[in-house]
Image (tube, rainbow, N blue to C red):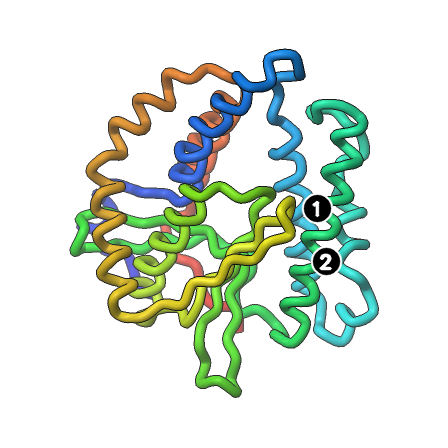
Amino acid sequence: MKKLDQESVSLPLLMDYQIEHLWRCPYRLQKAEQRQNRRQSWDWEHHVQYAIGHALSEYYHLRPEVRNEIPLQYMLEKWWPKRPDGFESVTHYWEMKSQITAGIYKVGNSNQDLGVPVLLYEQFRTPIPDLAIELSVIIQAMWQQADQGQPMLVQKYLVSYHEAVVEAYRHLVTVFCHYAFGQLPSSIEVFCLLENRRLTFFTHRQSLNQAMDYVALLRDSLKDVQRNSRECQCASCVSRRMSYLNRVESAGEGPGRLLS
């Protein structure tokens, strides 16, 4: 991981969490308009993402031999919201729990032979001098396999599939890993738990060129996107904006480190 210097500190900051919020907002507004006769609350997705994150983090902090004795679904049960507050209905609460449980079961099966992650739910910042920005990315899980020459596998876990969010994340991670770790991830996997779906992207030199172009366009259009987002005053968008501002204020100065 490269250390931040005085010049990089003044670079505009681009955060993956911020981009994910902005890209989701139009989708949420469209769906809300289609459900005029139902509760217009999306708080359930915040609750579910919180439960998923804590369940996976706690589970993968365990030693592999211990994990073999504890189904990942049990961890989800521990963190799942105890009340249906914020869900569209009690029925929706149980439907989401059933579908997310099936999705997280697939995550556990897919990762069964991966061992111990080298990174787990850590936030990193690194300068991207070629784009004149500083990039912040949350690595939910990164794995390295010695028997395959130490390739990096980066994983992200989403409540549901959003094409724009997935596209943005894989490009941001590609650029970030190149500058932060000096190499591209061998692959990027995105689990969409509601759809019980796993998307896998393999990276190569051309992937970096495409990702750099994407992030450059993202940087240039961010001001317009932010302005459009601020016009939305739904509870979800207001909550996310407040959360983002709090994260910026509390972000550390130094970059993260690989787990030993």
The residue furthest top is 37
Total numbered badges shown on the rendered structure: 2
Q: Is residue 103 above or below residue 245?
A: below
Q: Which picture quadrant has residue 71?
A: bottom right
Would you name the residue on which mark 1 appears? 100
Residue in the picture at 31% in, 43% down: 14
Q: Is residue 228 above or below residue 168?
A: above
Distance between the Cα atoms at labels 2 and 1?
8 Å
Q: Amino acid at mark 1?
A: Ile
Residue nearer the viewer, 254 or 248: 248
Q: Which corner quadrant holds the N terminus?
A: bottom left
Q: Is residue 206 above or below residue 103?
A: below
Residue 59: percent from the left, percent from the top? Answer: 70, 60
Side (left or right) of 237 relative to 175 = right
Residue nearer the viewer, 257 or 206: 206
Q: Which picture quadrant has residue 112?
A: bottom right
Comes first in the chain, label 2 or label 1: 1
Would you name the residue on which mark 2 appears? 105
Residue 237: percent from the left, percent from the top? Answer: 48, 23
Residue nearer the viewer, 213 or 196: 196
Q: Amino acid at mark 2?
A: Tyr
